[in-house]
Amino acid sequence: MKKLLMGIIASCIFVPLVTQAQFAKPEDAIKYRKSVFSVMGNHFGRLAGMAQGKIPFDAKIAKEDADLIAFIAKYSLRGFISGSDKGETKASPKIWEETSKFEQYGDKLLSEVVKLPQSAGKIDDLKAVVASVGGSCKSCHDDFRLK
């Protein structure tokens, strides 16, 4: 039991350090997260366009986009490291003040985007999941993104 507890404590200390260490400077973290969200936004925009009937539905493309979003979303929050609240960013300082709430929003996003690949084959399924994912994105932007 003692070894298990020490392992848990060590991982709680080590994991944030590894995440922090992947960026040489806070500006690198900002560039990283902008890139991740840009890719996600571009591919999600195509899914949203299909769901809204603005572009023709293509199940193959929808599945490819959905798979990519579900994969990359797992890495989307890694760029929110200490010190990356300053610089060329729209990230609100509230992210670092309300970390628990921000992480809950991140968890919500992840729980929604994993539904995208399964929904990509049928337009009606895709519409429902796109609305849910879009709502998750909007909630976080409303609370944690500077205008």
Image (spheres, rainbow, N blue to C red):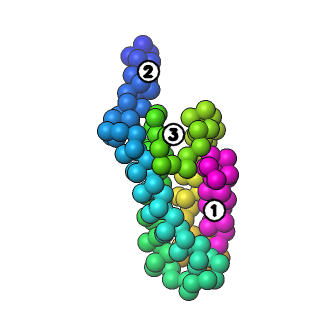
Q: Is residue 88 above or below residue 115?
A: above
> Is there CB contact under 8 Å for labels 2 and 1?
no
Label whose residue precedes the other's in the sequence (2 or 1): 2
Which disc, if any, is residue 9? 2
Task: Judge whether residue 139 is colored magenta.
Answer: yes
> What's the distance in space between the residues labelled 3 and 2, CA to CA?
27 Å
* Amino acid on which the number 3 mark rests in the picture: Asp
Name of the residue lying farthest toward the bottom: 56
Which disc, if any, is residue 85? 3
* Amino acid on which the number 1 mark rests in the picture: Gly
- Characterize the local packing of mark 1: few (<14), some (14-19) or many (20 or more) Cα atoms within 10 angstroms: some
Where residue 82 sits in the image (x, y, percent)? 46, 34
Q: Is residue 124 above or below residue 12?
A: below
| Local SS, label 3 | loop
Task: Single out the mark in the foreground, 2 or 1.
Answer: 1
> Is there CB contact under 8 Å for labels 1 and 3?
no
Q: Main secondary structure of the magenta part?
A: helix
What residue lies at 63% left-to-right and 83% top-to-bottom? 53
Where residue 11 sits in the image (x, y, percent)? 40, 27
Residue 92: image quadrant is: top right
| Local SS, label 2 | helix
Residue 133: image quadrant is: bottom right
Q: Nearer the viewer, residue 30 or 136?
A: 30
* Amino acid on which the number 2 mark rests in the picture: Ile
For the image, the number of numbered tags is 3
Residue on which the image places disc 1:
134
Task: Single out the mark in the foreground, 3 or 2.
Answer: 3
Which residue range is magenta in the image? Answer: 127-147
What residue lies at 55% left-to-right and 50% top-to-bottom? 90
